[in-house]
Amino acid sequence: MFTNPVTSREIRLAARPIGEPKPTDFAFAEVPVPAPGPGEILVRNTWMSVDPYMRGRMNDVESYIPPFAIGAPLDGGAVGEVIESNAPTVPVGATVSHFQGWRDYALLPASAATVVDTNIAPAEAYLSTLGTTGLTAYATLREVAPVREGDVVFISAAAGAVGSIAGQLARKLGASRVIGSAGGPVKGAKLLSDFGYDVAIDYRAGSVADQLTEAAPDGIDVYVDSVGGDHLRAALSALRTHGRVALVGAISQYNATEPVPGPDNLFLAVGKQLSLRGMIVTSYFHLYPEYIGKAAGWLADGSLHAEQTVMDGLDQAPAAFFGVLNGANTGKMLVRLT
Ligand SMILES: NC(=O)c1ccc[n+]([C@@H]2O[C@H](COP(=O)([O-])OP(=O)(O)OC[C@H]3O[C@@H](n4cnc5c(N)ncnc54)[C@H](OP(=O)(O)O)[C@@H]3O)[C@@H](O)[C@H]2O)c1
């Protein structure tokens, strides 16, 4: 029989970051791990996710997801092994995904965990390609800004978690040309070799607008915006009549300390009759069975390339989070906890 670990380490929000988050905004704590009550399971977390949206939750503002509380443990996507169970539906030994990351052990209702199939892919894939990351890319290109046969598609943050999958999915959905933007030549090469892109734009090397015009002289049909700012402005100029924009994120302004004005060419959306649509992945869970059915097949036949950047140990979780905001990752940034 398993003997409870005496304590578990967890990471708490110590202070609300101003601008770029820093180590002192986080605090480590050691807490006792109680035995599971009725219907509860105890999970030894093996992997956790760090995601750009967590930066917004560190501000004290109302949004689609509540802000983190000062002094409370952070949370977010994690996977792990059930080591004690008081719930008939989730046995000891099962691998589960859940939302109590940023800690070594998680005590939670079994109803808040999903048993995942590690025969299809390793557990950590459920935090990336087979998780909300992959679903974000799929739902965006299927429903939010649907890709049609022959479309020219432009994707920002293209070498990251969502972007690395989105490039490949755009091609599978029939795009004739897939253009990605990422920081630096190494990521640019990766876009072309592994992530399904035809053209790589290095936004750090020069004007996004000029590079996009060169990459798509006749314009683009779909833009997946994860960045905002100069990328959204350039895309609005390049979009053709009836073009579609998925507003997925705006990472260029997550650390802003003042409100950031919108693009000064938004009026182009009128004349070109553009559609601009915000997306939050939790509104697209109905597509998950369809997506995972396809993605599992693509992973198995090698036609979907999944990449991750891994940092080891809970101690490294804040650094991994800083890294995902600063571009230290290619593919999905993950923290391995074993
Ligand atoms: N709406 C939703 O439901 C949903 C779900 C998932 C993700 N998202 C959003 O999608 C975007 C990507 O998320 P992700 O998890 O896939 O993260 P990610 O792309 O793996 O990581 C973020 C990347 O953004 C790039 N970046 C950082 N600052 C930038 C800047 N000023 N200009 C251009 N690029 C910058 C960095 O790559 P470089 O080296 O290329 O700069 C970094 O690797 C984020 O905006 C996130 O908030 C939204």
Image: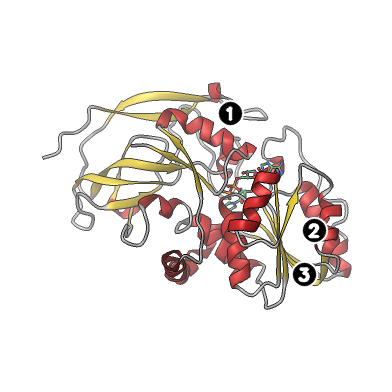
- Dot 2 or dot 1: first in sequence order is 1
Q: Secondary structure at mark 1?
A: loop
Q: Residue 120: where, in percent of width, then height?
A: 35, 62
Q: Is residue 146 visible?
A: yes
Residue bearing the label numbered 2: 235
Q: The N terminus is located in which quarter?
A: top left
The residue that appears at 88% across and 60% down in the rendered structure is: 267
Q: Secondary structure at mark 2?
A: helix
Q: Is residue 82 above or below residue 311?
A: below
- Dot 3 or dot 1: first in sequence order is 1
Q: The C terminus is located in which quarter?
A: top left
Q: Residue 334: where, in percent of width, then height?
A: 47, 42
Q: What's under tag 3, amino acid-wise?
A: Gly
Q: Residue 57: where, in percent of width, then height?
A: 56, 39
Kindly check if marks 3 and 1 are in contact, taking CB atoms under 8 A apart as contact: no
The span from disc 2 to disc 1 (Cα, nearest Å) is 33 Å
